[in-house]
Image: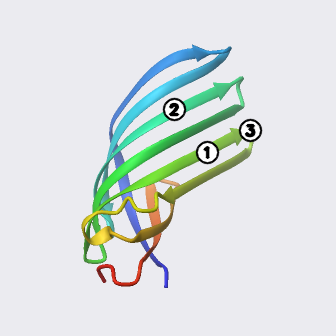
Amino acid sequence: MSRRVTSAFTIDRWEGEPGDWHGAQLQRTQAAKTFTGELSGSSALEAVMLGVGEDVSAYVAVERLEVEFDGLKGSFCLLHSATANGDDNEMTLTILPGSGTGDLVGLSGTAEILPGHEFALVYDLAEGAAV
């Protein structure tokens, strides 16, 4: 059965290297976050962001979270994929299968970034993993 935990987060570091990519604005970004709430810990993120015109953009990223929640402690990688086209926005955050360490071996699931710098993780642990 899936479980859900939430957390506030702050962005502690945001460093980008802007550039031009075939007429579009490309930015490689490194960021660090701190999570507080039911899920607590920190993360490091590597992203590539692309802006095409004023209303069209996309980004892909990988984020490694070192966290504790529900009595579990370890790390995992979260894959980000998002697009925006005017008011049409889509974002997918998926736990990379096999990336869990410590108590999070066998972790799977998804996440959401909510308004107000809130984060929600919906997860499952493989049978036989830490409870």
Specify whether residue 51 is in view: yes
- Residue at the location (56% across, 23% down)? 26
Q: Residues within 10 Å of mark 1 (few under 14, many from 20)?
A: some
- Residue at the location (51% across, 32% down)? 48
* Label 3 with label 2: CB-CB less than 8 Å: no
- Residue at the location (38% across, 58% down)? 99
Specify whether residue 113 is in view: no
Q: Name the residue under label 3.
A: 85
Q: How crowded is mark 2: few (under 14 residues within 10 Å), some or many (20 or more)?
A: some
Across and down, in percent, residue 124 comes to 45, 76
Amino acid tagged 1: Ala
Between 108 and 122, the residue placed more toward the observer is 108
Amino acid tagged 2: Val
Disc number for residue 39: none
Q: What quarter of the picture does the C terminus occupy?
A: bottom left
Q: Mark 2 points at which residue?
A: 48
Across and down, in percent, residue 58 comes to 63, 36
- Residue at the location (69% across, 47% down)? 89
Q: Mark 1 points at which residue?
A: 82
